[in-house]
Image: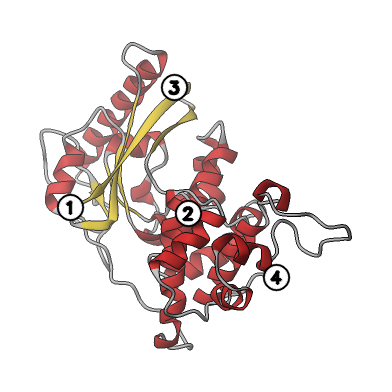
Amino acid sequence: MQQTGPKGELGDFLRSRRARIRPEDAALPVFGGRRRVPGLRREELAQLAGVSADYYTRFEQGRAENASESVVGAVAAALRLDAVETAHLTRLVRNAGRAGSVPAAGAAVEAEQLVRPGLRRLLESMPGTPAFVLGRRTDILAWNPLFAALVTDFAALPPQRRNKAWLVFLDPVTRGRFVNWETKARDLVAFLRFDLARHPHDARAAALIAELTEHSPEFGPLWRAQEVAGKTHGGYHLRHPLAGEFTLAYESLSLPDDPDQTLVTYTAEAGSPSEAALRILASEAARGARAVDGSGARDASGAAPAPAPRPAARTDRPA
């Protein structure tokens, strides 16, 4: 049974990783009789990591507050963790050690994230490239018209619904955009868990996970799998009622002065059918932006849009 809180997160992650390794895979002797746990026992993992069984037990329970980097590295090596998983483990160990300093009654209220004007202008300067700024807990902080045309009308959504995880799991329109939805869902959950370790007491993240667990039958099993992944690069097979099916590659660029914000762009191979599909969506986005600018309508934050030579990126402003 999975626990809650930083110490529970650490224990759940380590148990999930022990379960992936069979004793014979680690060149450990296998004795007869039924094993009570899948994968390695704590004693076996301790042997591989070069620590005592008692110490590893305390480590897994989050009671080894002063664990050194060498110990964490030895455990990560014994569990065959990759670089992202090792970084995640390091954060979990640190969070567990600090758990006593956080009031048990409630989680921290994270400050609203603001997108710099220069970053908004960068979004505006890419009318032919779907682009957005991803924040904590997969909040969508800013986007350009082509990304809205590709996925959904973010300006029509209340601010709390401009969240990638919520949209992919609970919004039928967004869900339908991904031909390989299962892959997108798995990647998104892995990134959400990786991000949560950076802000373990974020009340809004906890509420989001609770909502997704309650309303999406697919989210719970994926969340319990304890997979973690960073936001880097890759590609997805997409569909759109105006452009059919096509494939786009994405690149993620973390801001050097704010690791909680990531610029994500989607591109298509030059001369490909996917590039033609993207041009169709770009034309639609440009027509929609001109119609809004010409009508004098107000955007989702209540501000009157100013005329501009190119479609303006939209952003969510703090309430």
Kindly identify which residue carries mark 4: 1
Q: Of the residues tagged 2 and 3, which is closer to the observer?
A: 2
| Disc number placed over residue 85 in the picture, else none | 2
**Callout 4 touching callout 2 (CB < 8 Å):** no
| Disc number placed over residue 243 in the picture, else none | 3
The amino acid on which the numbered mark 4 sits, given as a three-letter code, is Met
Q: Earlier in the sequence, mark 3 or mark 1?
A: 3
Q: Earlier in the sequence, mark 3 or mark 4?
A: 4
Q: Earlier in the sequence, mark 4 or mark 2?
A: 4
Whole-percent x, y for residue 131 in the image: 29, 38
Where, by quadrant of the figure, is residue 272 drawn?
A: top left
Eyeballing the image, is 231 above or below 260?
above
How far is the residue under mark 3 from the one under mark 1? 31 Å
Whole-percent x, y for residue 198 in the image: 38, 65
Q: Of the residues tagged 1 and 4, which is closer to the observer?
A: 4
Q: Earlier in the sequence, mark 1 or mark 4?
A: 4
Q: Of the residues tagged 4 and 2, which is closer to the observer?
A: 2
Q: Of the residues tagged 3 and 1, which is closer to the observer?
A: 3
Q: Residues within 10 Å of mark 3 (few under 14, many from 20)?
A: some
